[in-house]
Amino acid sequence: MALLVAVNGWDTGPWVARLKARFPDRDIRSWPDAVGDPANIRYALAWKAPAEALNACANLEVVFSLGAGVDHLLGQKNLPQVPIVRVVDPDLTARMSEWIALQVLLHHRQHLAYAAQQREKVWRELTQPSARDLRVGILGLGVLGADAADVLKRLGFNVAGWSRSKKALSGIDCYAGDAEFDAFLARTDVLVNLLPLTAETRGLVNRSVLERLARDGVLGGPVFINAGRGGSHVEADLVVALRDGTLKAASLDVFETEPLAADSPLWDCENAILTPHVAADSDPEAISDYVSEQIRRFEADGTLENRVDPARGY
Ligand code: NDP
Ligand code: OXD
């Protein structure tokens, strides 16, 4: 029985090499050029591959998403009716918390203002608020949101989070559901999105949400940080908010359409920090270990961890 690596936009080579090292006796195939007889394929490791590539494998038993997000799979029609497993891995989680902490610190330590001063050769100290006076609010308190919340808390920030079901996390103010959304926004100076993209979260961060963030915070205006999915914000609203002061600044790693179009007005927003969907890369070494472990477990006792609920969308 073979494993199929079906990735789109990434180099297949490192994945195939890592899997061969972990399963020397198995047939490791790759889509689209080396699929062979699809009937032999038992497991697919997928990133943005079309559903047809997976559907062609009549004896497929499990699809492993090679990222933590699964919108690249669930957003497609006619997926094979087999379990989907997503990545939960300490390497990926640590990378995300690094990126989130970096962005929160850049805004907290007024990096955009100091970079502008440096360009003008200006030596001027700005008043520096304490971390405990900056209220960070995280949308999504799952694997990544909870870890980022913990890291930010340990840096001294005043951290809250919002999720579907109520959480109890030490030192974090936990809000849940529609009923507590407004209260969560009203206490938030820096809004961080780590939600999965689902029917409910699509377009969530729009003009109205940005207007409901706290406006009395120590930075002089709210900041939005998005490393979840670009589909969860309304980009046109972000641009207007960045221009008219509704938002003081933003850090964006994800966009409605990726790559971000060359003519997107976001490129020219001096109060926005943009990165090209690199907040938490899937490392072939770490993620191949994770998938191999899952396959061994599945073959030993039929169980899988971190299964996606297609009805919920994450
Ligand atoms: P999890 O599934 O562990 O957590 C998702 C969180 O979102 C949960 O707390 C969940 O609530 C909450 N949530 C989902 N839907 C809603 C809703 N409608 N209202 C309120 N809360 C909701 O996911 P991860 O933390 O592992 O990953 C989050 C996302 O990060 C991924 O889906 C992906 O899009 C993105 N990502 C981005 C990367 C990048 O490089 N930019 C890299 C990796 C991931 P509850 O706990 O109640 O279920
Ligand atoms: C992921 C991603 O979902 O890289 O892991 O975006």
Image (spheres, helix red, strand yellow):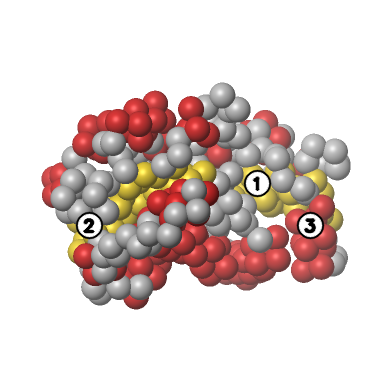
Q: Give the residue pinned by disc 2.
A: 218
Coordinates of residue 135 in the picture (x, y in percent): 24, 59
Note whether residue 123 is visible: yes
The alpha-carbon separation of the residues under discs 2 and 1 comes to 44 Å
The amino acid sitting under disc 2 is Val
Q: CA distance from mark 2 to mark 3?
A: 46 Å
Is the residue at mark 3 in contact range of ligand 2, meaning its CB lies under 8 Å from it? no
Q: Secondary structure at mark 2?
A: loop
Q: Is residue 31 above or below residue 115?
A: above
Quadrant (top left, top right, bottom left, bottom right) of the N terminus: bottom right
Q: Nearer the viewer, residue 137 or 40?
A: 137
Which is more N-terminal, label 1 or label 3? Answer: 3
Q: Quadrant of residue 246?
A: top left
SS category of the residue bearing label 1: strand
Q: Which residue is mark 1?
A: 46
Q: Residue at x 67, y 50 (%)?
A: 45
Residue at x 40% of width, y 67% of height: 147
Image x and y of residue 285, in percent: 70, 66
Image coordinates of residue 213 in percent, x first then y, are 21, 44
For residue 9, side relative to residue 226 (left or right): right
Residue at mark 3 to residue at mark 1: CA–CA distance: 14 Å
Mark 1 residue crowding within 10 angstroms, few (<14) / some (14–19) / many (20+)? many
Q: Is residue 295 above or below residue 308?
A: below
Q: Amino acid at mark 1?
A: Ala
Drawn side of residue 256 relative to residue 162, left or right:
right
At label 3, the amino acid type is Pro
Q: Which residue is denoted by mark 3 in the rendering? A: 14
Q: Earlier in the sequence, mark 2 or mark 3?
A: 3
